[in-house]
Image (cartoon, helix red, strand yellow):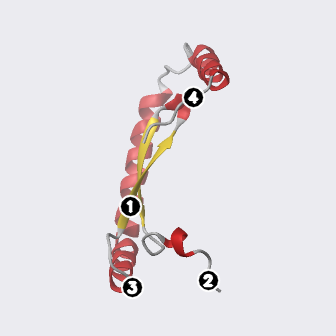
Amino acid sequence: MEVTNNHAEEQVIETYREEIKGRVHSGYLPFKAMFDFCFALILFVVTLPLVVVAIIAVKLESKGPAFYHQVRVGLMGKHIKVTKLRSMYIDAEKHGAKC
C-alpha cells in the first residue's frame, strides 16, 4: 500500500524538518529512551494476561487471525506498520451495520 503526498504536504514535511533540525539532540534523549523502554516493558508484563484472554476470545468467537496489520503514515510521511488485535469479523464492512 503506497501513500502519495501532494505538493502542499511535501512542503509541510520539509518545513518541519528544517524547524527541528538542530534541536533534537540533547542529553535528555538517552534518559527518555531508557525510561520509555522500561515503562513499556513493565506495562507489557502487566497487561500480557489480559491480551492473552482477548486473543483466546477472538479465536473462539470467529475464524481468522487474532491480529491484523495496517500501514499508516506517521511523522514526516514515514510509513509505519501497525499490528492490532482484531475486534470485528473479517470483512465486516461488506455486510454493513447490524442492529
Report the disc number at residue 98. Answer: 2
Mark 2 or mark 3, earlier in chain: 3
Q: Position of residue 50 (x, y in %)?
A: 40, 75
Question: Label 4, label 1: how many angstroms apart (C-alpha)?
Answer: 25 Å
Number of the label disc, if any, that sits on residue 68: 1
Vertical relation: 70 (above or below) 57: above
Residue 57's place in the image compared with 40, above or below, is below
Q: Nearer the viewer, mark 4 or mark 1?
A: 4
Task: State which quadrant residue 65 falls in.
Answer: bottom left
Residue 72 is situated, as x and y percent measured from the top left of the image, at: 49, 44
Question: In 3D space, how far apart are the residues under numbered discs 2 and 3 (Cα atoms)?
Answer: 17 Å
Crowd rating for badge 4 (residues with CA inside 10 Å; few <14, some 14–19, many 20+): few
The residue shown at (40%, 77%) is: 54
Q: Earlier in the sequence, mark 1 or mark 3?
A: 3
- Identify the amino acid type marked 2: Lys
- Say if mark 1 contacts mark 3, CB within 8 Å: no
Please state which of the two labelled residues, at mark 2 or mark 1, is closer to the viewer.
Answer: 2
The Cα atoms of the two marked residues, 2 and 4, are separated by 36 Å
* Pick the front one: 36 or 66: 66
Q: Residue furthest front?
A: 94
Mark with earlier residue (4, 3) = 4
Give the label on residue 87, or none: none
Please tell me how crowded label 2 is: few (under 14), some (14-19), or many (20+) other residues with Cα within 10 Å: few
* Depth check, front residue: 45 or 54: 54
User: Label 3, on which residue?
Assistant: 61
Q: CA distance from mark 1 to mark 3?
A: 16 Å
Q: Amino acid at mark 3?
A: Glu
Q: Name the amino acid type tagged 4.
A: Asn
* Residue where numbered disc 4 is placed: 5
